[in-house]
Image (tube, helix red, strand yellow):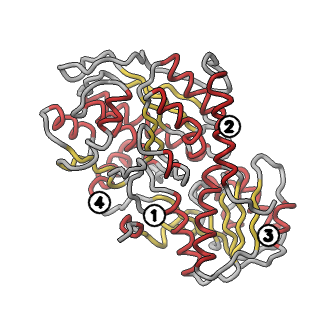
Amino acid sequence: MVRNRRSYSVIAVSVLWTLLVAGCAGDAGGGSTTSSNGAGTPTTAAETPGTGEGVTIGAIVPLTGELAAVGEPTLEQFEWAVEMINATGLNPCGPISLSVHDQGDPEDAIRAATQLINDENVVAIAGTTSDGTVAIAQLAKEERVVVFSPPGGTVTLDELGGDYVYRAVPSDTAGGEVAARWITDQGYQRPAYMILNEESPLSLGEVAIDIVEAAGVPPVAEVIFNPGQPSYQGELSAILDADPDVIFLSAGLESGSTVIREAVAAGYDGEWYLTSDMAVQDVIDAVGADIMGESFYGAIPSPDESLEGYGRWRTLFDAEIGGPPGPYVTNSYDVMNVLALAMTGPEGGCTGESINANMRAVTSGGTPVYSYEEGANLLLNGEDIDYEGASGPLEFDETGTPPGSFSVLQVQDGVWESVQFYPAETFVEG
């Protein structure tokens, strides 16, 4: 269908939350899978480091479906960071346990969050994608549980975030600006936009279209399509009939891979721009490097590799995990470290309220630190810290959003290679 402005997506999520939250209070199922490593009863911060009874953090991550390529490395980083945090023995709240749930859609996120809050007494929830974060934001605020998303860039959080709701990536406003800059800088004159009917793809698509159009390059076609279809030939016909010189594709692994294969089979040989959820190795593997060639570009929130925080993380990552880092891995690593530092922070306490009060205190205005252990030692000695993350600085603005940098990637010899880097200051006004 032809694009309709995205306001309806926010309305749909709000209605969904209203309908589900009361009915889900006693629902322990709903398609979630749960594993817990220990008790999750909140405690009061102990005077001696590490003597608390322990706390549980909920991890609601997409482990199946369109965004599994994002969820799997996210969970890996959560587990790895928690292992290192617990090994220090410094958290006044005691060891952190993760309770893991699969987020297939916003309804799953609401069910999982309700169970985590009512039955498992979690102090924070991490991992939700854009639509999941939007879906549980009001519940989190009412129940005073911090939600911290590694990939949730949607512009809806520009309004909902900032108190109990945070993210470790810049807003899609910046992501859309990157896309628009690339499209205009490359001199494309006939861009077409194909956008998945979900929160983040819609968010990115709207920003990019508006900026490119304002620069004097109107779209030749705009199509919004639904996930889960076996074929998108009908939707593609409106795109291909417009004879674009670039297709902006904002989608997920499954639907996006199908779109690409069908477009190439139909004879399209122009260039592509893929948004962050698709600029991953899984897409190349699913479509085929021979099909993608070097005509595919994409952008992802990307750490500044010149910063010390990234260098320290990468040394550990290469030694203990290895291989090319997946999407949002540095952001996911930072989420767990910031939450643990907030438990150890100046306000004290092992509740959602105290974590929320400390989120900004441990990420700005003090001595720069690059790990939980380094920061916790200073905090326990009464000093202020500024956690400089693997993903970059995490100084949250009023919407709970940090600054962030981006890389534009190109498929070369079957892998994504960086061809353009936009530092965080690119998106700072003034």
Ranked by sequence position, the earlier of labels 2 and 1 is 2
Q: Is residue 339 above or below residue 226?
A: above
Disc 4 marks which residue?
A: 307
Q: Residue at x 60, y 75 (%)?
A: 212
Ranked by sequence position, the earlier of labels 2 and 3 is 2
What is the distance, in whole Å, between disc 1 and disc 3 at their CAs? Answer: 27 Å
Amino acid type at circle 1 is Phe
Judge from the rendering whether residue 293 lies leftward or rightward of residue 71; answer left or right.
right
Q: Which mark is residue 15?
A: 2
Ranked by sequence position, the earlier of labels 4 and 1 is 4
Amino acid type at circle 3 is Ile
Q: Nearer the viewer, residue 377 or 179?
A: 179
What is the distance, in whole Å, between disc 2 and disc 1 at their CAs? Answer: 33 Å
Ranked by sequence position, the earlier of labels 1 and 3 is 3
Ranked by sequence position, the earlier of labels 3 and 4 is 3
Q: Is residue 189 above or below residue 22?
A: below
Could you tell me which secondary element the residue under label 4 belongs to?
loop
Within the image, what quadrant is residue 104 found in?
top right
Judge from the rendering whether residue 118 lies leftward or rightward of residue 78; answer left or right.
right
Q: Mark 2 or mark 3: which is in front?
A: 2
Within the image, what quadrant is residue 305 found in?
bottom left
Disc 1 marks which residue?
A: 406
What is the distance, in whole Å, between disc 2 and disc 3 at their CAs? Answer: 32 Å
For label 2, the crowd category at 10 Å Cα-Cα, with few meaning under 14, some 14 to 19 and many 20 or more, is few
Q: Mark 3 or mark 4: which is in front?
A: 3
